[in-house]
Amino acid sequence: MPKLKVNDIEVEVEDGLTVLQACEKAGAEIPRFCYHEKLSIAGNCRMCLVEMEKSPKPIASCAMPATEGMNIKTNTAFVEKARKGVMEFLLANHPLDCPVCDQGGECDLQDQSMFYGVDKSRFKENKRAVPEKNMGPLIKTQMTRCIHCTRCVRFATEVAGVSELGAIGRGEDMQITTYLEHSMQSELSANVIDLCPVGALTSKPYVFEARPWELKKTETVDVMDAVGSNVRVDTYDWEVKRVLPIINEDINEEWISDKTRYACDGLLNQRLDTPFIKYNGKFEKASWSEVFKIIKSKFENSSKDKVCGFVGDLTNMETGYIFKEFFDRTLNNINYDSRSDNRFLDNSERENYIFNSSINGIEDSDLIFLIGANPRYEATILNARIRKAFVNNNTKVISLNDVGDLTYPYKNLDGQTQTIKTIFEGSEEISKEIISASKPMIIIGESLLKLNSSEQLFNLIKNFLKKNNKFTDDWNPLNLLSCDAATVGNFDLGILNNEKNLLEELKSNKFEIVYLVGQDNLEFNKKDEFVIYQGSHGDKGAEIADIILPGSAYTEQDGYFTNLEGKMQKAYKASYPPGEAKEDWQIINELAEVMNNRKLFNDKEELESSMFNYLKLQKEKQITINEKQKISDFQNEKLNIQIKDYYFSNAIARSSKTMIECNNSKLNIKSTGTDG
Amino acid sequence: MSLRRPAKNQPETFEFNSSSIKEANKIVLKYPEGKQQSAVMALLYIAQKQNDNWIPLAAMKYIAKFLDMPYIKVYEVATFYTMYNLSPVGKYFVQVCTTTPCMIRGANKLVEACKEKISDKENELSNDKSCSWMEVECLGACVNAPMMQINDDYYEDLDKEKTIEIFDKISKGEDPKPGSYRGRLNTEPENNRKTLMDVKNA
């Protein structure tokens, strides 16, 4: 642990840290452009120059390892002059177009030239102009502004795992580009916009929309996948203008996926803003009291066994809980479920449906076995973590299926369930590898749980791991990769029915009333059912509805979500629901009041405390509903990984124009000029 | 100098011929296991030699696959170094040095000769498609300034007339003699040696 002095303050830093990090520890701020904590060190912007005793020249602190006895000065006239000089060079070719630049107000170059730069220019010559580059539908380029920090190149190569960006040419002619200007094929591509310290790479969908100081910023969580990335939602009036990542080292580090970032324009389209009633196949606007009255009479005129309810993939836990309460207390019925497919779930223990090793645990693991999962599309941020583990520790990854490029190499097997069986019966080479690994991770995708023999396979895997003592106090190798934000929360709340197969009964048209809360993924042929749809978007669920109750999206109401690791996080209200729409819990509460003249809960706080109470009780007594084991013969199946279309995986993303563009660029559809 | 761009007309495919493959494999072997990508510069040069002194995009892709590295990384290297030609050059590829010593000794006259005899602009093929020229930075023969390089040979101590003479020979298909055009042996002083007179073989 070297000790050194920074501005006469003594600091002791860990081995391998740089002078810049030591300076930060001593509280001295160092300006920088190319240096970034999460990327490799480039040392090419020279902005972080500091004075070191016995060195005649200033040193680049980001690239200099901190060593014993250094004496660093960051506040001398020498350093100030060095910074001014670097700043002048950087600005020599940088255009003065801040008024029309989208980075204005949150630009590192702008801020740092205010603090460390010179207020005049001595550069009388012509500035360099660089042609714009095509980097796909998300990244707008204005390469004249580029200062060649190469953060984007390093991000693409190291974190995203797609070596498509590079710096071509040299000296003044150096340009950052993708190979022959193909769009970047990564689900993390838009993070380069945040990384770019200047306005060279800016957000295409957000172009000229707003200035950062005009936006209201709300820190919340994302619901586009089950990872629960921490995000900041920026709103201008009602509109959600953009979504940016915030740092959470345990979950998303500093990155978010393109879907998280850009599906937000789906919050503006296809919105349900008033209650609707279907008359003769046509929706007509109605008032809340009208629709509640109709729903009440419908519920009263049908027997309670003929009512069922489904909760969707983006529903927050409060809504799920009050929905359950509504069925339990108001309708006296347990015909509700949160699953939209026949997936196997043994919820007697919580570890059966969460990602037990945790996202941070990926970095400690020494063997990762993917079964029926494609983390690149099912949980992009988690996949980036696996890549990080591969890059840092050379972690071995095995996948049952060949799932294409995962941004890291893996060994793929034949995709047959027979293979899983033989491996977890212990007779294969891989079985031995799992046994000898100290921290193996078995990542089970949802596709496996949908198979006919999913129960046997799941129990086989779990028992194998148990038998070989892979479950220890600090390690749990069993990982379920959920795809949807609400999945784990709904399971925690017990919104499922393992006694009856509700889906089968729904498909054979046994119900009279179907109540859908944000559930758009059910596939059944509607006959005489009366369908109530409550949700935010006019999607598949609303299409088949007879009554539509306009609800709110995740940015429009406070609500808890539990991510795939089982971490409970609160999403905060950034905007408000459009038109007549209400918060989801409120709708159900009011409906209960209409039915029984009594609200389920007086206010949101009561609902929340009741919900937490329920969760606590559940934790204490691990429920054992699933006693009867399905007895059927194992049969070999081909395990097909069914991934929902990545850019259209939920109602919000399906309403997003940006996601359509992303999808098109992926399919490489050439614009014909007639497609609008 | 500005950023050099790959040529518009690109061949569809490129492959090393047998002698190039032999040479390439020999170079790749020089690097330790897992560091084969270090051979990229040598391989680009082999590709350039094989393909009439220029590197098509197909060759970059081929080399990227050969060394198992991303296309963009090969592209970066090829655009960085000016001695890799990214568009077709003449069978006789003339490089005129215009850095200070040559410039003082009249390199601009050589450029004039190129413009008259080959093409108006740099990097353009002559009318008979056999020749192209470009200005380059110092080629390290300042003692014999002004000079130019045609393919692998240096032509030194030139002036406009002598340059034109060389070009005339080229267009007739003859190979002009490389070296000094004022009768010097290598870089020895003009007319006669002035120092080390007593050392016979100096």
Image (spheres, coloured by chain):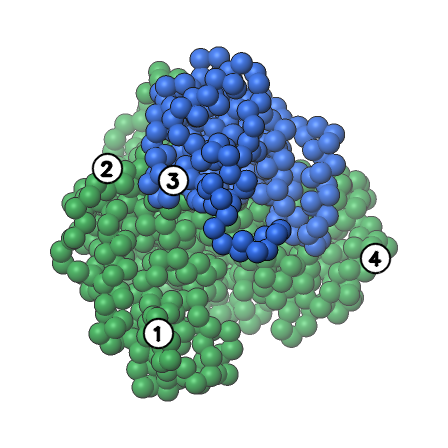
Q: Residues within 10 Å of mark 1 (few under 14, many from 20)?
A: few
Label 2 sits on a secondary structure element that is loop
Residue at point 79%, 55% (across, down): A430
Q: Amino acid at mark 2?
A: Ser
Q: CA distance from mark 4 to mark 1?
A: 65 Å
Tag 4 secondary structure: loop
Q: Which residue is mark 3?
A: B102
Question: Quick one: label 2, few (<14), some, or many (20+) residues within 10 Å?
Answer: few
State the blue chain. Answer: B
- Place of residue A575 in the rendered image (x, y in percent of width and height, measured from the top left): 25, 50
Q: Of residues A404 and A469, which is closer to you in this image? A: A404
Q: Give the answer, above or below, for where A665 lies relative to A426.
A: above
Look at discs 2 and 4 and give the one toward the viewer. Answer: 4
Residue drawn at 32 percent across, 62 percent down: A47
Could you give the CA–CA distance between mark 3 and mark 2, rounded to whole angstroms?
Answer: 89 Å
Callout 1 secondary element: loop
User: Which residue is at 62% across, 51% downward?
Assistant: B201
Q: Residue A338: tell me if it is visible.
A: no
Q: Label 1 sits on what residue type?
A: Pro
Dots 1, 3 in contact, CB < 8 A? no
Q: Disc 2 and disc 4: Cα gap in Å?
A: 63 Å
Label 4 resides on the chain identified as A
Lower sequence index among marks 2 and 4: 2
Q: Residues within 10 Å of mark 3 (few under 14, many from 20)?
A: many
Tell me how far mark 1 sits from mark 2, CA to CA: 78 Å
Residue position marked by numbered label 1 in the rendering? A56
Residue picked out by circle 2 = A287
Q: Earlier in the sequence, mark 4 or mark 1?
A: 1
Q: Which residue is mark 4?
A: A426
